[in-house]
Image: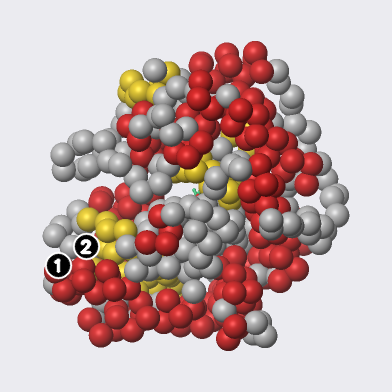
Amino acid sequence: MMKRTYIAEPFRIKSVEPIKMTTKAERKKLIKEADYNLFALDSEAVYIDLLTDSGTGAMSLHQWAGVMEGDEAYAGARGYRKLIKNAKEIFGFEFIQPVHQGRAAEKVLLPILLKEGKFAISNMHFDTTRAHVEIAGARAIDCVVPEALDTTSKFDFKGNMDNARLEQYISELGKENIGVIIITVTNNSAGGQPVSMQNIRETHAIARKNGIPVLIDAARCFENAFFIKEREAEFHKKSLKDIVVEMFSYGDFFTMSAKKDAIVNMGGLLGARDKKVFEVIKQRCISFEGFVTYGGLSGRDLEALAIGLFEGIDEDFLRYRVGQMQYIGAKLEEAGVAYQSPAGGHAIFVDAQKMLPHIPYNEFPAQSLAVELYIEAGIRGCDIGSYMLGNNPDTLEQLKADFEFTRLAVPRRVYTQAHLDVIVDALIEIKKRASKIKGYKIIEEPPILRHFSAKLAPL
Ligand code: F0G
């Protein structure tokens, strides 16, 4: 069996944040009051918060010092110049615009590329990306490799685009109707799974042949680069920076939620190569986000991000970071708890359908497991399955997701090995009583991104 020792932290702790402890009886009451929606819990009610790895990382002393250095000028702030210099060096893009987070970049960019009747094809759209494709009037098509669908198959690059299917879609729908091809690195919705350089090259070649622009959704591009270095022979000896530059060389645009791999609490980037399109981006940014030199961020945020980019791409950090997921993964495997394996970069995606085979997709097994984890140990994860996917925008019928995952996303530089053991132990306990766990029904839901605010009731 795969044995994995914990890779010790390449940092020490200088400031701590106490966490409130709760009892099981208290948690049962709290989750009922939250209508079984984990987004409705107060964070003080949570012991280990794995809702997201986005904006929840711990900043370094260098970043906090940068916060103090922040230049809050409305125009021409020092931090803006520093950020653009660092971002250009790392991504090799000519034009880069800061924005306040990933979805802001999507809101600014996607309506330039998409409109009614058009399609976006991606290895997998993240939910806000899908939402912005739909808000622009277009439709989003997911096109991940079939290996991703079997959570137990050991495939190194389960995040890959199914390039044969991509070509088929292009010929069926007409290349003039595909507004953009989106490569999401890592592929969050498929389990934080990496996309290989080989695959990115092929996707790019198909896009070029058909005259379709490529957008890199770069939220976790450093974790992706680390996997490429470890798993693709050609890159074993390359620096992560060289790998990132090559990855980005295949994109015409990139959007980045910097709240993940750049280890900041708020921030995003939008990159373009075409000067004319970048002029449009800047104008839209001024309307939606703020003037170009702050892009919806405080000056202090620009500083923290400029520094975080280099901390996030550090190889020792990434080895420890990805190692945390591999540590949890190895323990779950030993215990016979199914998850999207091999472990991805930012989270463990527990296969809730395998844990709760008696709960059908429209009773939301992954949401059910997320609620149980909260009750069991105060752990907050979330559903990445049919509950999150929502309804067909045309027929309003509940969609069936390819996966029913309970995602346990690990914030960067926040939790210790002992916290990870609590997660594993809780899952083992729940597995013992799995057959008694029930599904949920939705009693109230908004039309878009419903999982954030829907109310549920146990069946
Ligand atoms: N793209 C991907 C792949 C993401 O994972 C996210 C956010 C976004 C875009 C949007 O970025 O939140 O800064 O607006 N993912 C978070 C998550 C929320 O929990 O996976 P944002």
The answer to whether the residues at label 2 and label 1 have Cβ atoms under 8 Å apart is: yes
Horizontal side, residue 45 vs residue 3: left or right: left
Label 2: which secondary element:
strand
Q: Can residue 56 be seen from the camera position used here?
A: no
Horizontal side, residue 362 vs residue 196: left or right: left
Residue at x 31%, y 58% (from the top left corner): 142
The residue labelled by disc 2 is 119
Could you tell me which quadrant the N terminus lies in?
A: bottom right
For badge 2, the amino acid type reads Phe
Q: Nearer the viewer, mark 2 or mark 1?
A: 1
Horizontal side, residue 68 vs residue 433: left or right: right
- Where residue 217 appears, as percent x and y from the top left, is 44, 64
Residue at x 64%, y 15% (from the top left corner): 26
- In this view, the residue farthest toward the front is 1
Residue at x 53%, y 62% (from the top left corner): 154
* CA neighbours of label 1 inside 10 A, class few (<14), some (14 to 19), many (20+): few
- Where residue 433 appears, as percent x and y from the top left, is 58, 24
Could you tell me which quadrant the C terminus lies in?
A: top left
Whole-number angstrom distance, CA of label 2 to CA of label 1: 8 Å
Residue 298: which disc? none
For badge 1, the amino acid type reads Leu
The residue labelled by disc 1 is 173
Q: Can residue 190 be seen from the camera position used here?
A: yes
Along the line of sight, which residue is nearer the eye, 75 or 279?
Answer: 279
Q: Quadrant of residue 85?
A: bottom right
Residue at x 44%, y 54% (from the top left corner): 150
